[in-house]
Amino acid sequence: MPELPIYLDNNATTPCDPRVLEAMMPYFTSVFGNAASRHHSFGWKAEDAVDVARQQVASLIGAEPQEIVFTSGATEANNLAIKGVFEMYAGKGNHMITTRIEHKAVLDTCTHIEKLGGEVTYISVDKNGRVNLEELEAAIRPGTILIAVMYANNETGTVMQVKEVSDIARRHNVLFFTDAAQAIGKIPVNVQRDGIDLLSLSAHKMYGPKGVGALYVRRKNPRVRLTAQMDGGGHERGYRSGTLNVPGIVGLGKAAELCAREMDAEADRLGKLRDKLREALLQLEATTLNGDRVHVLPHVTNISFNYVEGKMLMLGFNRDLAVSSGSACTSASLEPSYVLKALGIPDEQAHSSFRFALGRFTTEEEVDFAIEKVKETVEKLRETSEIWKMYRKGVDLSEIW
Ligand SMILES: *Cc1c(COP(=O)(O)O)cnc(C)c1O
């Protein structure tokens, strides 16, 4: 019996790897210098540590160290990319293109851009959650300055056609930004191969600490320029002022190094565990897979358990299993996830959807337990469900459900 509760919510955040924590520790106490202190060894040691981390992060994504701007996370990196391009390229135009299934850190920033007088086109996705490429290309116009398409979606794990999108962007001379918070460290990402101009990542999605991330900003072919969103001492080549979070940055660097080294083996291990979980759960009657079966992160699956009430299902297993549901708590009510809605999934089905995101510390024993727990809970709920009885009798529930 595994230790309970079991954490299967690694897309929300990952635990910090003990090896990452160990690398960070000296930078809180003995090596505490300000990386911007140029005149003594305390500063130099901090700066050296930041340089190593910059190299580690750059190397994970095929970038040059000078192209990495450290931030407080992917949210800040997304803000800097979108607002920074909007201001810097105002002379070229004010139109941006993104998708309906981006993270709120992109969508809410786009709303802000619209309030400032910018125009944003939101591209639809197909039933597997991949971006509609024809619609995307057709949306490009003379004043288009940015295309923002995430690398992999946080709710479904679906991996986007990044190379195709960047080819379109290049052809039309438009910058391409990708929120890669979920993909980095899980699958190979390379800014050269993929033709990426701007990319955001976050340490706490890849076994590093919370509160630190980075923005990749391409330096040549083309050279991308941004208007800073944080003014101050001109840190990070003027793109992001503020005393560097040295322990956090060291942690992000170490996390990147570990991911680079262990990604292939880990993707293989997690892919097998995820497949086991997915296929076992899909064997239950009236279950459906949300997202793409092939173009998907190796550790993620999102499944709808139809004709059970999502809230009851969650209550039935959430003492033992930590997962996310297809319902988002907004102020007072439960709203179906806008991502699942964009895939054309009906509201009731979205409410009974669950995301299982395995991680570096997930064991096979935990996956086996999760399978049994979910199956048992679904079956028990269906035993007493009127809707389920009607469905089994062949009643058309599309009106009621
Ligand atoms: C988690 C996440 C973010 C936000 O990252 P923070 O570092 O927590 O600000 C942005 N985009 C995606 C796709 C994410 O999964």
Image (spheres, rainbow, N blue to C red):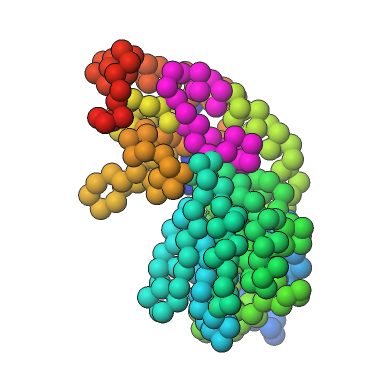
Return the x and y of residue 33 as percentages of the image width and height. Answer: 62, 73
Residue 299 shown left or right of residue 40 in the figure:
left
Return the x and y of residue 356 as percentages of the image width and height. Answer: 50, 35
| Nearer to me, 87 or 243 | 87
| Nearer to me, 386 or 1 | 386
> Is residue 213 visible to us here?
no
Give the vertical position of 302 relative to 111 (above or below).
Answer: above
Residue located at (65% from left, 32% from top): 271
Residue 88 shown left or right of residue 116 in the figure:
right
Quarter-wise, where is residue 385 in the image? top left
Return the x and y of residue 364 as percentages of the image width and height. Answer: 60, 24
Residue 136 shown left or right of residue 189 in the figure:
left
> Which range of residues does the magenta coloring cover?
278-303
| Nearer to me, 329 or 121 | 121
Give the vertical position of 198 relative to 354 (above or below).
Answer: below
Give the vertical position of 294 relative to 72 (above or below).
Answer: above
> Is residue 297 visible to us here?
yes
Residue located at (56% from left, 87% from top): 91
Residue located at (25% from left, 30% from top): 400
For residue 270: magenta?
no
